[in-house]
Image: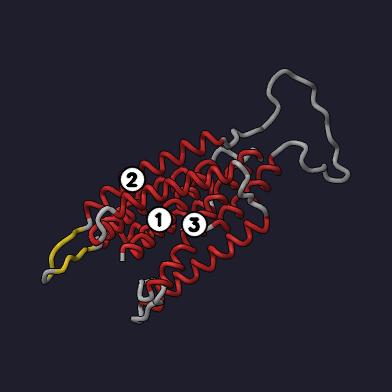
Amino acid sequence: MSNPVFKEEAFNQASQDFRATQPGWAAPTAGSHVQTQPVTDGPVSGWQKAMTINGTISASLVLLVLLLVSGAFGWSAASGPTLDNGVETYSFPPMAFLGIVIGFVAVIVANMKPNLAKILGPVYALAYGFAVGAISKGYETFYNGIVVQAVLATASVFMVMLVLYRTRIIKVTDKFRRVVIFATIGVMVLYLTSFVISLFGTTLPFLNGDNMALSIAFSVFVCGLAAMNLALDFDFIERATQSGMPKAYEWVAALGLVVTLVWLYLELLRLLSYLRN
Protein backbone atom coordinates (compact mmCIF):
# COMPACT_ATOMS: atom_id res chain seq x y z
CA MET A 1 0.00 0.00 0.00
CA SER A 2 1.23 3.49 -0.75
CA ASN A 3 1.98 5.76 2.19
CA PRO A 4 2.00 9.46 1.22
CA VAL A 5 3.43 10.39 4.62
CA PHE A 6 6.75 8.92 3.56
CA LYS A 7 6.74 10.97 0.38
CA GLU A 8 6.05 14.19 2.28
CA GLU A 9 8.79 13.46 4.81
CA ALA A 10 11.19 12.67 1.99
CA PHE A 11 10.29 15.89 0.19
CA ASN A 12 10.71 18.06 3.30
CA GLN A 13 14.01 16.44 4.26
CA ALA A 14 15.34 16.70 0.72
CA SER A 15 14.37 20.37 0.57
CA GLN A 16 16.29 21.08 3.77
CA ASP A 17 19.35 19.14 2.65
CA PHE A 18 19.30 20.74 -0.80
CA ARG A 19 18.97 24.31 0.48
CA ALA A 20 21.73 23.75 3.03
CA THR A 21 24.21 22.82 0.27
CA GLN A 22 23.50 25.84 -1.92
CA PRO A 23 25.80 28.88 -1.72
CA GLY A 24 24.34 32.01 -0.18
CA TRP A 25 21.41 30.25 1.48
CA ALA A 26 22.39 31.01 5.07
CA ALA A 27 23.88 34.18 6.50
CA PRO A 28 27.50 34.03 7.76
CA THR A 29 28.10 33.60 11.45
CA ALA A 30 28.28 36.89 13.31
CA GLY A 31 31.86 38.14 13.52
CA SER A 32 33.14 35.84 10.81
CA HIS A 33 35.19 37.30 7.99
CA VAL A 34 33.91 36.72 4.47
CA GLN A 35 36.72 36.76 1.95
CA THR A 36 35.85 37.67 -1.61
CA GLN A 37 37.15 35.52 -4.44
CA PRO A 38 38.32 36.72 -7.83
CA VAL A 39 35.89 36.28 -10.71
CA THR A 40 36.81 33.46 -13.08
CA ASP A 41 35.25 31.90 -16.13
CA GLY A 42 35.31 28.42 -14.57
CA PRO A 43 32.49 26.76 -12.64
CA VAL A 44 32.14 28.02 -9.10
CA SER A 45 28.94 26.27 -8.05
CA GLY A 46 28.43 22.94 -6.32
CA TRP A 47 25.07 22.29 -7.96
CA GLN A 48 24.00 18.68 -8.22
CA LYS A 49 22.20 17.09 -11.12
CA ALA A 50 18.54 17.88 -10.62
CA MET A 51 15.55 15.58 -10.76
CA THR A 52 13.55 15.68 -14.01
CA ILE A 53 10.12 14.41 -15.02
CA ASN A 54 11.61 12.40 -17.91
CA GLY A 55 14.05 10.77 -15.52
CA THR A 56 11.20 9.87 -13.19
CA ILE A 57 9.20 8.39 -16.07
CA SER A 58 12.21 6.30 -17.12
CA ALA A 59 12.73 5.02 -13.57
CA SER A 60 9.02 4.19 -13.29
CA LEU A 61 9.10 2.21 -16.53
CA VAL A 62 12.13 0.24 -15.34
CA LEU A 63 10.33 -0.67 -12.10
CA LEU A 64 7.16 -1.64 -13.96
CA VAL A 65 9.08 -3.91 -16.35
CA LEU A 66 10.84 -5.61 -13.43
CA LEU A 67 7.49 -5.96 -11.66
CA LEU A 68 5.91 -7.63 -14.70
CA VAL A 69 8.84 -10.01 -15.23
CA SER A 70 8.85 -11.03 -11.58
CA GLY A 71 5.06 -11.28 -11.65
CA ALA A 72 5.29 -13.80 -14.48
CA PHE A 73 7.50 -16.00 -12.30
CA GLY A 74 5.09 -15.62 -9.39
CA TRP A 75 2.21 -16.62 -11.65
CA SER A 76 4.07 -19.74 -12.76
CA ALA A 77 5.04 -20.66 -9.19
CA ALA A 78 1.43 -20.67 -8.01
CA SER A 79 -0.27 -24.02 -8.46
CA GLY A 80 -3.84 -24.11 -9.63
CA PRO A 81 -6.47 -24.66 -10.49
CA THR A 82 -6.53 -28.20 -9.16
CA LEU A 83 -9.53 -30.33 -8.28
CA ASP A 84 -10.09 -31.41 -4.69
CA ASN A 85 -13.23 -33.53 -4.34
CA GLY A 86 -14.63 -31.82 -7.42
CA VAL A 87 -13.81 -28.30 -6.14
CA GLU A 88 -11.18 -26.07 -7.74
CA THR A 89 -8.40 -25.08 -5.34
CA TYR A 90 -5.36 -22.82 -5.50
CA SER A 91 -2.00 -22.96 -3.71
CA PHE A 92 -0.17 -19.73 -2.80
CA PRO A 93 3.65 -20.21 -3.02
CA PRO A 94 5.44 -19.66 0.33
CA MET A 95 8.11 -17.53 -1.36
CA ALA A 96 5.43 -14.97 -2.17
CA PHE A 97 5.04 -14.23 1.56
CA LEU A 98 8.77 -13.53 1.71
CA GLY A 99 8.42 -11.26 -1.31
CA ILE A 100 5.73 -9.23 0.46
CA VAL A 101 7.96 -8.74 3.52
CA ILE A 102 11.03 -7.84 1.46
CA GLY A 103 9.04 -5.42 -0.69
CA PHE A 104 7.52 -3.71 2.33
CA VAL A 105 10.91 -3.29 4.02
CA ALA A 106 12.45 -1.99 0.78
CA VAL A 107 9.82 0.76 0.53
CA ILE A 108 10.32 1.82 4.16
CA VAL A 109 14.12 1.96 3.88
CA ALA A 110 14.03 3.71 0.49
CA ASN A 111 11.95 6.53 1.91
CA MET A 112 14.27 6.86 4.90
CA LYS A 113 17.41 6.62 2.74
CA PRO A 114 16.56 8.21 -0.64
CA ASN A 115 20.06 7.62 -1.99
CA LEU A 116 19.36 3.88 -1.82
CA ALA A 117 16.08 4.12 -3.76
CA LYS A 118 17.85 3.31 -7.03
CA ILE A 119 18.76 -0.09 -5.53
CA LEU A 120 15.75 -0.71 -3.29
CA GLY A 121 13.25 0.24 -5.99
CA PRO A 122 14.21 -2.74 -8.19
CA VAL A 123 14.35 -4.91 -5.04
CA TYR A 124 10.74 -3.98 -4.31
CA ALA A 125 9.67 -4.57 -7.91
CA LEU A 126 11.25 -8.02 -8.05
CA ALA A 127 10.17 -9.17 -4.58
CA TYR A 128 6.66 -7.75 -4.46
CA GLY A 129 6.10 -8.43 -8.15
CA PHE A 130 6.50 -12.15 -7.46
CA ALA A 131 3.77 -11.92 -4.81
CA VAL A 132 1.48 -9.87 -7.06
CA GLY A 133 1.85 -12.48 -9.81
CA ALA A 134 0.91 -15.27 -7.40
CA ILE A 135 -2.08 -13.30 -6.08
CA SER A 136 -3.22 -12.59 -9.62
CA LYS A 137 -3.05 -16.30 -10.45
CA GLY A 138 -5.28 -17.00 -7.46
CA TYR A 139 -7.94 -14.56 -8.60
CA GLU A 140 -7.73 -15.83 -12.17
CA THR A 141 -8.23 -19.37 -10.89
CA PHE A 142 -11.69 -18.55 -9.59
CA TYR A 143 -12.64 -15.61 -11.85
CA ASN A 144 -11.66 -16.19 -15.45
CA GLY A 145 -10.48 -13.01 -17.18
CA ILE A 146 -10.44 -10.88 -14.02
CA VAL A 147 -6.72 -10.05 -14.26
CA VAL A 148 -7.06 -8.46 -17.69
CA GLN A 149 -10.05 -6.48 -16.44
CA ALA A 150 -8.08 -5.27 -13.40
CA VAL A 151 -5.07 -4.27 -15.51
CA LEU A 152 -7.25 -2.29 -17.94
CA ALA A 153 -9.13 -0.68 -15.05
CA THR A 154 -5.85 0.32 -13.38
CA ALA A 155 -4.52 1.86 -16.59
CA SER A 156 -7.81 3.70 -17.12
CA VAL A 157 -7.85 5.12 -13.59
CA PHE A 158 -4.22 6.21 -13.98
CA MET A 159 -4.95 8.07 -17.22
CA VAL A 160 -8.11 9.70 -15.84
CA MET A 161 -6.31 10.88 -12.69
CA LEU A 162 -3.39 12.21 -14.76
CA VAL A 163 -5.77 14.22 -16.97
CA LEU A 164 -7.71 15.51 -13.95
CA TYR A 165 -4.47 16.55 -12.28
CA ARG A 166 -2.90 18.18 -15.34
CA THR A 167 -6.07 20.14 -16.10
CA ARG A 168 -6.22 21.15 -12.42
CA ILE A 169 -9.73 19.79 -12.06
CA ILE A 170 -8.21 18.06 -9.05
CA LYS A 171 -6.03 20.46 -7.07
CA VAL A 172 -3.71 19.03 -4.46
CA THR A 173 -4.02 21.56 -1.65
CA ASP A 174 -2.73 21.17 1.89
CA LYS A 175 -6.23 20.21 3.05
CA PHE A 176 -6.59 17.64 0.25
CA ARG A 177 -3.19 16.21 1.13
CA ARG A 178 -4.01 15.92 4.83
CA VAL A 179 -7.35 14.21 4.17
CA VAL A 180 -5.83 11.63 1.82
CA ILE A 181 -2.89 10.98 4.14
CA PHE A 182 -5.04 10.42 7.23
CA ALA A 183 -7.54 8.30 5.30
CA THR A 184 -4.71 6.16 3.92
CA ILE A 185 -3.22 5.69 7.38
CA GLY A 186 -6.69 4.74 8.65
CA VAL A 187 -7.06 2.06 5.99
CA MET A 188 -3.57 0.74 6.75
CA VAL A 189 -4.43 0.47 10.45
CA LEU A 190 -7.68 -1.28 9.56
CA TYR A 191 -5.89 -3.83 7.38
CA LEU A 192 -3.30 -4.42 10.10
CA THR A 193 -6.06 -4.91 12.66
CA SER A 194 -7.82 -7.35 10.35
CA PHE A 195 -4.60 -9.33 9.94
CA VAL A 196 -4.00 -9.50 13.69
CA ILE A 197 -7.51 -10.64 14.57
CA SER A 198 -7.45 -13.17 11.72
CA LEU A 199 -4.69 -14.96 13.64
CA PHE A 200 -7.33 -15.70 16.28
CA GLY A 201 -9.89 -16.96 13.76
CA THR A 202 -11.92 -13.73 13.55
CA THR A 203 -12.49 -11.63 10.43
CA LEU A 204 -14.08 -8.31 9.59
CA PRO A 205 -17.22 -9.04 7.50
CA PHE A 206 -16.66 -6.18 5.04
CA LEU A 207 -13.11 -7.31 4.24
CA ASN A 208 -13.84 -10.90 3.27
CA GLY A 209 -17.15 -10.61 1.43
CA ASP A 210 -19.41 -11.96 4.21
CA ASN A 211 -21.55 -8.85 3.86
CA MET A 212 -21.40 -8.35 0.10
CA ALA A 213 -23.07 -4.92 -0.08
CA LEU A 214 -20.82 -3.52 2.65
CA SER A 215 -17.75 -5.19 1.13
CA ILE A 216 -18.43 -3.61 -2.27
CA ALA A 217 -19.00 -0.18 -0.73
CA PHE A 218 -15.77 -0.37 1.28
CA SER A 219 -13.80 -1.65 -1.73
CA VAL A 220 -15.09 1.22 -3.88
CA PHE A 221 -13.97 3.65 -1.18
CA VAL A 222 -10.48 2.13 -1.01
CA CYS A 223 -10.14 2.15 -4.81
CA GLY A 224 -11.08 5.83 -4.78
CA LEU A 225 -8.56 6.49 -2.03
CA ALA A 226 -5.85 4.74 -4.04
CA ALA A 227 -6.76 6.93 -7.02
CA MET A 228 -6.41 10.05 -4.83
CA ASN A 229 -2.96 8.82 -3.84
CA LEU A 230 -2.05 8.96 -7.52
CA ALA A 231 -2.78 12.69 -7.38
CA LEU A 232 -0.39 12.97 -4.43
CA ASP A 233 2.25 11.10 -6.45
CA PHE A 234 1.84 13.48 -9.39
CA ASP A 235 2.02 16.46 -7.03
CA PHE A 236 5.15 15.11 -5.36
CA ILE A 237 6.86 14.63 -8.72
CA GLU A 238 5.91 18.12 -9.88
CA ARG A 239 6.94 19.90 -6.69
CA ALA A 240 10.20 17.97 -6.37
CA THR A 241 11.11 18.73 -9.99
CA GLN A 242 10.29 22.42 -9.66
CA SER A 243 12.32 22.62 -6.45
CA GLY A 244 15.34 21.10 -8.17
CA MET A 245 15.61 18.09 -5.90
CA PRO A 246 18.66 15.82 -6.40
CA LYS A 247 18.43 13.26 -9.18
CA ALA A 248 18.27 10.40 -6.66
CA TYR A 249 14.70 11.45 -5.91
CA GLU A 250 13.61 10.30 -9.36
CA TRP A 251 13.74 6.77 -7.96
CA VAL A 252 11.95 7.79 -4.76
CA ALA A 253 9.12 9.30 -6.82
CA ALA A 254 9.06 6.35 -9.23
CA LEU A 255 8.89 3.88 -6.36
CA GLY A 256 6.04 5.78 -4.74
CA LEU A 257 4.11 5.83 -8.01
CA VAL A 258 4.59 2.11 -8.65
CA VAL A 259 3.58 1.24 -5.08
CA THR A 260 0.35 3.20 -5.54
CA LEU A 261 -0.37 1.50 -8.87
CA VAL A 262 0.15 -1.94 -7.33
CA TRP A 263 -2.16 -1.06 -4.44
CA LEU A 264 -4.81 0.21 -6.86
CA TYR A 265 -4.51 -2.94 -9.00
CA LEU A 266 -4.93 -5.27 -6.03
CA GLU A 267 -7.92 -3.33 -4.73
CA LEU A 268 -9.53 -3.43 -8.16
CA LEU A 269 -9.00 -7.19 -8.23
CA ARG A 270 -10.84 -7.43 -4.91
CA LEU A 271 -13.67 -5.17 -6.10
CA LEU A 272 -14.13 -7.05 -9.37
CA SER A 273 -14.25 -10.36 -7.50
CA TYR A 274 -17.04 -8.98 -5.30
CA LEU A 275 -18.95 -7.79 -8.37
CA ARG A 276 -18.54 -11.21 -9.98
CA ASN A 277 -20.25 -12.73 -6.96
- The label shown at residue 103 is 1
Q: Residue furthest right?
A: 31
Query: What separation in Å lies between label 2 and label 3 (alpha carbons)?
Result: 20 Å
Query: Residue sitting at 40 percent across and 50 percent down?
Result: 153
Query: Residue sitting at 52 percent across and 50 percent down?
Result: 230
- Where 76 falls versus 272 (above or below)? above
Query: What separation in Å lies between label 2 and label 1 (alpha carbons)?
Result: 15 Å
Q: Residues within 10 Å of mark 1 (few under 14, many from 20)?
A: many
SS at mark 3 in the image = helix
Question: Which of marks 3 and 2 precedes in the sequence?
Answer: 2
**Quarter that holds the C terminus:** bottom left
Q: Residues within 10 Å of mark 2 (few under 14, many from 20)?
A: some
Label 2 sits on what residue type?
A: Leu
Q: State which mark lies toward you, 2 or 1.
A: 2
- The label shown at residue 19 is none
Question: Which of marks 1 and 2 precedes in the sequence?
Answer: 2
- Where 272 falls versus 124 (above or below)? below
Query: Residue sitting at 40 percent across and 54 percent down?
Result: 265
Q: x, y (%) of residue 104?
A: 43, 58
Q: Quadrant of residue 134?
A: bottom left
Q: x, y (%) of residue 51?
A: 58, 37
Q: Are marks 2 and 1 in contact (CB under 8 Å)?
A: no
Label 3 sits on what residue type?
A: Ala
Query: Residue sitting at 64 percent across and 49 percent down?
Result: 171
Residue named by callout 3: 226
Residue named by callout 2: 68
Q: Are marks 3 and 1 in contact (CB under 8 Å)?
A: no
